[in-house]
Structures are given as C-alpha cells and as structure tokens.
Amino acid sequence: AAGSPEATLLLRQAFAASGVSKATLTRLVAAAFPFELDNFQMNAVQSLVEGNSVVAAAPTGAGKTVVGEAAVFIALALGRKVFYTTPLKALSNQKYYDFKKLFGEERVGILTGDVVANRNADVVVMTTEVYRNMLYSAKNDRAVGGYDWSRARNRSDDDILTSLFAVVFDEFHYMNDKERGTVWEESVINSPPSIALVALSATIANTADIREWFAAVHGPTDLHESFYRPVPLKFGFATRQGFIPIFARPKKGEKVHGRDAKGPAKKPAIHPVMKNVALVREEKDKSKRRMSRESFPSIGFIVRSMRRNEMLPAIFFIFSRVGCNRGAAMIASERGELVTEDERLRILERIEEFRKQYPLVLDEDRITQAEKGIASHHAGLLPIWKTLVEGLFQEGLIKVVFATETLAAGINMPARSTVISSISKRIGPEGVRKLTTSEVLQMAGRAGRRGKDTLGHCLIMDTPFEVPQDAYTVLTQDVEPLKSRFAVNFGMVLNLLSKRSTNDSKALIEKSFGNFLALKRMSQNRTKTSEIDEELIELLQEAKEFLAAYDPVSLQEYQKERERLKAEIRSLEYLDLQTLANKKDFLESSLSYSPCGRAVLFVDRSDILNQSESSASEDEDVIEFDEDGENDQIFETDEDRKVEELFDGKFTRNIYRHMESGMFIGKVEDEPERYAILTRQNRVHIVTSECLLEADLAEEVSSFTCTVDLSFLPPKDKWKKVSMDHFFVPGWDETRDLVEHIPEKWSPVENPKIGSQLDKIERLKESMMTKEVHSAEHRLLLLQTVQKVATLEKKVKLGPVKNRTMEGTWQNFTNVQNVLVEYGFLDDDLKVTSFGELGASLSAENELWISLVLSEQELSNLTPSQLAAVMGAVLAEGSAREGSYFDFVISPQVEDCCERLAIAAKKLQASQEKNGVEIPIYLDPSEVGLVESWASGNTWPELVSKTSIEEGDICRRLRRVMDVLQQIDHAPLVSETVRRNARLALNVMDRFPVADQVTYSVHSLDRKRKVQTPDETSDDEGSTDEDSAVFIEPVDEGDEGL
C-alpha cells in the first residue's frame, strides 16, 4: 500500500492500537512511502509522531516535502485534519492534484484566492494568506478576506481548530519576502499551541533562530537540517569555448561543503581553468577593454552543447519576459531536433486536447515552439497555458523551458539541468543588483531529478556585465538568514482589537520574530555592557551633538534618495554597456569597407591611468570622530564621487570620460581587425572595435581627398601599448595635412531608454536639491556622520535592543490606531466600531481605503460592470508597463466616481502622512476600461485586441477585482444594492479564460446566494417568496461565444 491512499487505512489501525511504541509508529509512517527515507526525513517523522513542531531545512531537491506529507499521513491516521499552506497559488494547485493521487480524491480539498474545492476535506491545501485570514476569522466570529470558514462547515470555530493536527508551511523561507513575509509571522504567532507547525524551508543561515522562536512563541519544536542532495549537483560556467567546472575536485580525503555535502566544511577551491578565465577577464577589465559579443556564449550555442552532452531537459532562467520569449523563438528557429517523432506526436495530441477544451486562446507561435520541445513560462502567459507547459515538461516532452525566476519558487518542474543567464537582474526603480546566494541556489536546485538522474547540472552564463569570479563567489558565500518582515496594517490592528485589549495585542506583537531576535541579542550583550570603551561613548555623543541640529527623518529620507540616485546611475552605466555591445557588430562591418576620412568617436585610453589617479577627492571635509582616530575621505566610493559631480554639473558617463574624435584612415590588421584612427594631435591610434563608440555614416566623405599610406606605420614592436585593444604611434607628414579635417567631438546617437534613464536621474537630482539637507553647509560630512552613528551605536549598545525594535513596531501599531480612530473605525476607547467591522472583514493591502470606497453612497448608483470598474481603479498598483495602451470606452459614471474618490484618497493620504503610516493607497482610472469591458460581457478576443498588455497580466488584474467582489458578499455594512451588483458583476466575469476551473474558479458557496432585483424588493423582511429571487449560478462556458 506504500505510496497509495490505502496506506492511510493501515496507519490508522496502528495508531489506534494500544501499546505500539513511537519508534514503531515512526517506521510505519516511513513505510507509507514507496521509497526508503533517509536519516534527515526519519528524524523529522519521529518528531511529528512525538507531537512536536518541526523546522526542516534542506537544499532544493533534498526531499523535505516528504516531511510535510508525513504530517498528512499522521493526521489522517489520528482521524484529524491538516492544512498544507504554500506561498503560491500555482504551487497550491499542483499540491492539490498530487495529494489527490497520494491520499485519495475525497480526502483532499483546496482553498486559495482562486480555487475552492472540497473545503470540508481532511487535507486542505491553501495559500498562507488564506490560513492567516482564517485565524483572524476564527478568533473574531466573522468572515475575513471573503472566507467564513465556520459558516461553510456548519461547525464552531473551536471545533475547526481543535480538529487540526498540523499546519504545514511549504517554502517557509518566503518569510524573507519584503512585502509578504509578515503573513508567515502572523500565522505562526496566531496559531493555537495545540497545532503542530511544520516549516519546510530551503537552506537558510539561521535555522536555529527559527527553531528557538517557534519554541518560544508556540511550543516544543525540533530542528532537522540536511546539506545533502540525493542527486549531486555539478556547477559549470558556460563560456564561448565550452562549459568549465566552477569547483576544483577535492583532494583525496579532503571534505568540502560545496553545495552537495552532508555537513559544513572547507570552502571548495575554484577550478584552475575557471581561475584562468577569471584572471584573463580581470586583466581586460583593468585595461577597460570591452569584449566583443562573439566572446560570450549565445543561447543557441548553449542549448546545442547541452543536447550533444545529454544535459536536457533544462530550465533556462532569464529575468525578463521578453528575454524568455526571445530565447524560445531563437531556439525554435534553429535546425536540429530536440524531440523524437514519437514525442512530437504526443505533444501535438496533448495540444489538440487542450485546443478542444480551451478554444481561441492558443498562440500559433507557442504551438510551433511546443511541437519542437520548447516553451516559455512567465507571468505574461495565461495560467491555463502554463499549466499545460508544466505538464508537458514533467512528462519529458518539453526539453527546454525559458522561465523567469518565479518558476524556481517551489513549482514541481525538476530538470536534468538549469541555466542561469545572468547573476544580476534589474529590479525596477532600485536599479540593477546581484542575485543572492539563496536565489541562485533556489534556481540551481531545480536540476537533478530524483530517480532519473545520477547527476544534475547548473550552468551560469558568461556575460559582459559580470566577471567569472562573481559566479564562484555567489556559490560559496553563506546563504542569507531569515529576517523579520513583521508589518502592521489596518486589517491586523482591527482584527487584533476585535477580541483583545490593547495590552493583549501588544503581548501578541511582542512574539514577532524581529522582537525575538532583539531580545536574544540583548541577552547576549548584557555581559559585554561593562566592557564598553568610554572613548566610544564620548565619540558617539560628539557625533550625536553634531547631528542634533538636523531633523533625523529628513536625513534618513535624503539618504534613501541618495542611494536610489546611485542605483539609477548604475542602471545608466548598464544601459551604456548594452548600447555599445549592440553597436559593435555594425561598426565592424561599416568600417571594414569604409573609405579613408570617415569621422569616428573612440575611447582614447592613453591617459587613463592619470585620469583614474586624479579621481580621489581633495575635499577637506572629513569625519573627526572615527573610533580608530583616522580621518575618512568624503568620497568613500566612486559612486559618491559621481553623485557629487552630478550635483555640480560635472558628471560624465563612464564611456564618455575618455571620448575623443578622430578620422578613420584605414584597416591595419584582420585577426583581430584593427583600425587606424588619426587624432587632432597628429597621433595615430591602432584600435580594435572594443574602443569604438560611433562612426559618422550619414554621408560619403567628399569634401577633401584622403589617402594615407599605412606602410609608414612603424613595426608593431615599436607601437606604444595602452592595452591589447589600443596602441598608438606618432603621425607623419602625410597625416598632419589631414588633421584640420577632423571634426570636434559630437554627441553619439543613443538608445531611447538611455534618454528616459537620464530624465529619471535628472528628476531625482532636482528633487534632492530642493531638500533642506542638501543645502547644509557640510552635507557630505553630515551623511557620513549618520552612518558612523549607526556603526558606533552597534558597538556601544546604548539602550536595550528590545526597546529599539519593539518600540518601533508598537509605534507603528499606535500610528495605525490613530488613523483608524480619526476615521471612526475605532472609538476613543480603541474598541472596534461597526465601520471597523467592515475593515476587519476585508483582506487587501489597505483595508481602510477599500472600506472607505465601499462606504461611498455613489456606488449604489453604478451598474454591476461599473462597480467592477471602480474596484479595478482602487486595486490598480500602477503596474502597467511603460508604453502600454488601453483602447476602451470608460463610462462617465465611472470617471465621476473616480474623481470623487480621488478627493477621499488625498484626505486619507494626508492623515496617514500626519500619523507616520506608510500603506499604499491605489487609485488609477487608466485601466478601468479593461475591467468594465470584461464585466459587460465582451469576449476575450475583443478584450485583448484593445490593449497591449499581455494575457497573463489581463487575467491577473481581472482576478484581483473578482477576489474583492467575492469579499463584498461577506462584508458588513455594505448596501444590498452594492452586494447584489457585486455578485452580478462576478457572475459575468466568471468565464474562460479568466476563470478556467483549474487555476481559478469562483467560490461555489459564495455564488449560489439569493439576490433580489430592485423592482422585486419586498417591504416584508420575512418574505421567502422564491419567485422574487434570482439565484446566481455559474455561466455555462459553452455559451460564452469565444
């Protein structure tokens, strides 16, 4: 019965029998799996049998999911229930289908924001947000976030919680997510102690802290860690010459930790070939050489090489949708088959089945790619199509998937190999950043299929924007620790104060992970307090006195803007490098056949050493209070110098710092191609295309005669070397006559994105220059002092750490309270009012704002589609990509309503700012036509034809609106008209492909509710006339006209 639903029946008999030891029960649970468990898994199962909570941390692919499944087996054996939570709806869907096979269809249900099925089941898969909302709902006797668990099950809240054996938190490391991490902390501290918590996490640095926190706030908890991968993982560096091992083989008897070992040990050495590649690149970087595009591997080269070396199937991680689509199209256009004829026919059969079930949503290019064993996978695609891709990949029919990093976040798509296209990524307004070690390992961990592969492969691509050493470094650094992301919001405050006093709420907040760590640090530092150096205290006091004249908030805000400006400058330099790389091929082909006399721009590096030596600042402003007694230069980094140059109007981009104009007078060599460039100093520079910036190709050279006899060039051993790409020699009489025809430097033609980036930098600079801090006499000294104070405070430890952490969190709580009191959601005694009940029932980023919108009387005058449109406006996060268009007609009523809401939003924003509350308030009418069109019954082809945003984005926007419409049905105080219109709008929007019954379906229990139309409303509140009611039923998908 191992690996089948019948295993549960046998376990139930064993757990019901008397006298069976816990060791025997542990072995029986292990026997329920169709494979032998390793020691890590067995130890975790034993802890669960003993009734303890468990923190299980292991590399991706090491089998920690078995621990969660064991918790399910034990719960079913005990006749109790289990919740299995995941961070992603897609992962919840996948677990739901996996668990139905493992535990039996009737025993498994799902409850996410998108799909609800068999919610009374013994095993319910859900997103972590849903579990958090259920905890608030159970404690406050109300629906939260649209889910009223007790009403649906017709059972008391206490019964629901006491019937639970365990809650499993899959991918627990998501607690590190800046925006969503608070959900995991709230879930842990609100869970009843009677429930076992099972946290499954990728390898993290502070697992011991997590275990201690669980034990402190919840109950007995055991930690089980593994560094072992059942399928070893080999890391390679993909270059144009081939795949190079990143790590050297350990010497005989030497234990290294690498990323496959069974425990921590010595860091692995870099492979000698890899080290040579890194040294060569380092030399080129020192000489400021730009390597040609041909120096780096193409996607096609890598896929062809992987096919020859039997390294497929593979996941190719690219950090942009466009990049994923381009990669898939590129490989599909190449010769060579990735799939056999039999596999191709099986793919076509699956696609034909999909076409019959979901007509008119297939893209012919994607079908062609899939037929060849190629697919892309990212948020811009329809969820139902991604489900098909995932299925084909799991069956081994898709050989290469080009995916964004979200695919690495737990979705079960193991491959033989993974390829990471770059170890840096753009992150919006923050610019470009390097990937963390945890992120790289999460993606790498998808490689190596248990039971299929003896070795997994992860390749990191060589690119112009990183150096080989970066790949080695990111793989050998320590993984990042989990941090507290506990965040106070309106919904949390209202739900806590609904059944708790202020003091009890504070006691609960004190259980946060951040406060736990602060208390731990405080305890560790008590012994050091007596050893504090008095000189450091004096130094800190001197620094604080210097800062006392300035507003600390203004200083902090200015510092943040300065860091953002640095990031934008980094992004600009990244774009410059991309632009030059794109120009290179064109310049090579143009100059190879160009006549003598062509004007060019190039990088004259002959004085680069002198330039770099003069970059240090001579400013006399220094920090006087360094604990080591040493003065610090104002420009601690090159980025600081660039920022100050920007403010002074002296900023020059890196690629133009040594730009010079010259005249092309001929080609000197072919391998590599070297060009002779004459400058106004009558100097002939012999350069490769790496030094070229631009050539004036607007018109033919005809204003003068240009002939140069390059035989006058001295022998190569007489050339003066600047770098391998740049030599120069003095000119001669013939070249001196041409100098007068060399033009002055001009501005090169640039990518429009660079202009946009320059505008962004200029706006940020102007904003900073209006700040009071910017005009301070010793601005730079001031900013450095702020940083020094932070460093000194860590050493001096003035005041308990607990106070700094907890006081900050509690101050946020108090600030939110103040806003809620101002708006009547709390009374003067901090009791939740009827309006507060409305806010507490909602789940949104800003529950107060959504509550205020739902309280607007004007909503009752809107039609169902107009109501949906308005909700779309207040949920819009301004996420439409730059240049997106929407060709929809918006109802005047919707525009009028949005204008009135803008006044309310401005007022709320003022209140939040006054009270120090930073919670987003969204109102963007630009996309509401999309929502109104779909809610009015327009077809999917009509919808996509009127906007440039991708289908996956359309789906996500509409589903977000539908989620809130479902919450309205449970929300108190909402007028019956608005409630009815919400259900009617939901009824129209609930159709394919937005709702597909696989990745998204409207909650059936919420749909079949009696709704009276306005002209049928009876004054008799006790009327139950069935004829006066309309039942909202799901639309038959076959009648959608798609």
Image (cartoon, rainbow, N blue to C red):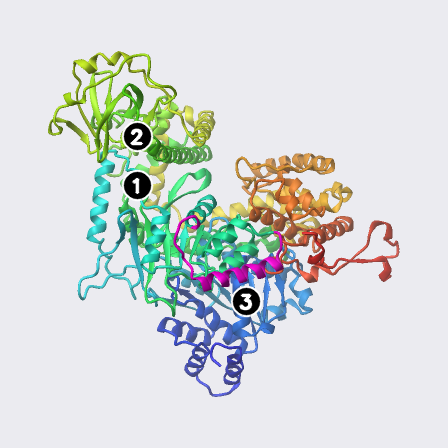
Question: x, y (%) of residue 975?
Answer: 76, 49
- Residue 1000 appears in which quarter of the rendering? bottom right
Q: Quadrant of residue 545?
A: top left
The reply to whether the C-beta atoms of the residues labelled 3 and 1 are less than 8 Å apart is no
Find disc 2 in the rendering and name its residue: 634
> Crowding at label 3, few (<14), some or many (≥20) Cα neighbours within 10 Å?
some
Residue where numbered disc 1 is placed: 294
In the rendering, which numbered label is found on residue 97? 3
Whether residue 941 is visible = yes
Q: CA distance from mark 2 to mark 3?
A: 59 Å
State the separation of the CA atoms marked 3 and 1.
46 Å
The residue range painted magenta reads 332-360
x, y percent for residue 796: 32, 45
Mark 2: amino acid: Ile
From the viewer's side, name the closer residue of 474 and 319.
Answer: 319
Give yes or no for residue 344 being in the magenta stretch: yes
Sequence-wise, the earlier of marks 2 and 1 is 1
